[in-house]
Amino acid sequence: MSRKELMDVVITASGEKGYAASVALPAGAVVASWEETAVVCEATKFTIQVGQDRHVDADAVRFLNHSCVPSVFVDASTGNVVALRPLAAGEDLTFFYPSTEWEMTTPFDCSCGHDGCIGRISGAAAVSADVLRRYAVNEHIRALVAERDSRLVTSAG
């Protein structure tokens, strides 16, 4: 089964387009890949940040919605969308936006409804290192957090 057959475009409960698993998937399954079809571009609501100053637009990630309890991880280094846990057919495919995004072009108030919801989603720049440690995040975000937090320590010292 090709990766394109592993997810469907659906209309979510909030009325927006999203992706859902089309079949049951085990944890660690690569649900989608975008490297071959990615177009480097300016940041928009639909792009994924894949480096400190690099964004891509690709169909494989265009309609992945946010959740504070994500079902998939968007791995910017490999171009893969990976299941974080076993997924049921029809389950929404969501990821934690600050895991790829430093500063979002279109911040919003999260409505995921989960315990531990972080509220305003505007990128990892606005999230504490303690909160980010609860999530799988990409290397460029870890580097930017380290840089931010070292400046805070230096300016406070």
Image (cartoon, rainbow, N blue to C red):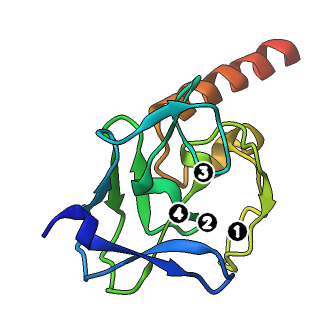
Give the mark, 3 or 1, whose residue is nearer the N terminus.
3
Above or below residue 23? Residue 5 is above
Q: Secondary structure at mark 4?
A: loop
The residue that mark 4 highlights is 63
Give the mark, 2 or 3, whose residue is nearer the N terminus.
3
The residue that mark 3 highlights is 46
* Marks 3 and 1, how far apart at CA: 22 Å
Circle 4 residues within 10 Å: few <14, some 14–19, many ≥20: some
Q: Which mark is residue 152?
A: none
Residue 128, given in percent of the width and then of the height, sits at 72, 43
Q: Quadrant of residue 68?
A: bottom right
Residue 72, given in percent of the width and then of the height, sits at 41, 62
Q: Residue at x 67, y 82 (%)?
A: 15
Q: Which mark is residue 117?
A: 1
Residue type (three-letter) at the residue carrying disc 3: Phe
* Marks 2 and 3, how far apart at CA: 18 Å
Circle 2 residues within 10 Å: few <14, some 14–19, many ≥20: many
Circle 1 residues within 10 Å: few <14, some 14–19, many ≥20: some
The residue that mark 2 highlights is 68
Give the mark, 4 or 1, whose residue is nearer the N terminus.
4
Residue type (three-letter) at the residue carrying disc 1: Cys
Q: Quadrant of residue 126?
A: top right
